[in-house]
Amino acid sequence: MRITKLGHACVRLEQDGATLVIDPGGFSEPDAAVGADAVAVTHEHGDHFDLDRLRAAARARPGLEVYTHAGIAARLGELRDLGARVHEVAHGDTPDIAGFDVHVYGERHAVIHPDIEVITNVGFRIASPGGGVFHPGDALTVPEDPVSTLLVPVQAPWSKASEVIDYVRAVGPAAAIPIHDALLSPTGGGVYGGLMGNMLPADYVRLAPGEGRDV
């Protein structure tokens, strides 16, 4: 399986001629989901979910498959009109998404502040020859299944470095690829990289937008 980092929290997975894009949001490239056979969306925040990017994907791929939780699915009538097939998923579901073997984990977004409502968030674990790639969205969900490559939300208004380090240790992947990093300057990315590289038992590999790696 080939994984390519796109902007912020968006990644593209390619395997056996099929393409799955997760979280093409407002901080990712405008064409981040174009060409995908399927798109998965973890939650409704604009840096993960952007209708313009989903419209572009649906127009480019008749019959585009979209997987997300019920709250978002209810808002995607326009995509259905464009021919997309929208599927609701929740914690515990095991859909076959465009040939990818997927297990859905998680239910709630991490707490940003007690005054801010906690919304629904689902994560997607994609089985891979190496063991599994997990995109948690904006949560620190630990899947029951093994994870060889963790897409770790490295910086967010709701997190701190110690929590991120403990999360990666709890999941126990062989490799951790940082996502959710659009708010980091190059200097900040280097600081996080040094810290994570020293503190994590996993191989910490930050991919630039457009850069890929086999997993």
Image: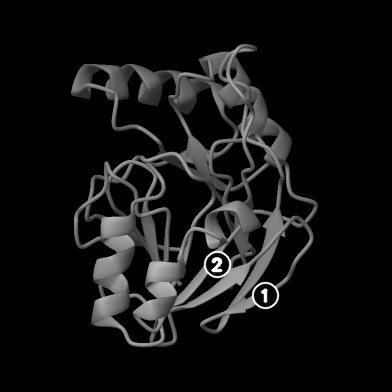
Residue 199 picture location, percent across and down: 55, 21
Along the horizontal axis of the image, is 189 left or right of 89? Answer: left
User: Mark 2: which secondary structure?
Assistant: strand
Q: Please indicate, yes or no, whether residue 20 appears anywhere in the rendered image.
A: no
In the foreground, 144 or 63: 63
Amino acid beneath label 2: Tyr
Q: How far apart are marks 1 and 2 (CA)?
A: 9 Å
Amino acid beneath label 1: Pro
147 relative to 203, above or below: below
At label 2, counting other C-alpha atoms closer than 10 Å, the crowd grade (few under 14, some 14-19, many 20 or more) is many
Query: Which residue is denoted by mark 2 in the rendering?
Result: 67
Residue 76 picture location, percent across and down: 46, 64
Along the horizontal axis of the image, is 17 left or right of 26? Answer: right
Residue 21 picture location, percent across and down: 40, 64
Query: Which residue is denoted by mark 1 in the rendering?
Result: 95
Along the horizontal axis of the image, is 166 left or right of 177? Answer: right
Q: Residue 210 occupies which quadrant of the picture?
A: bottom left
Mark with earlier residue (1, 2): 2
In the foreground, 155 or 32: 32
47 relative to 16, above or below: above
Q: Residue 15 occupies which quadrant of the picture?
A: bottom left
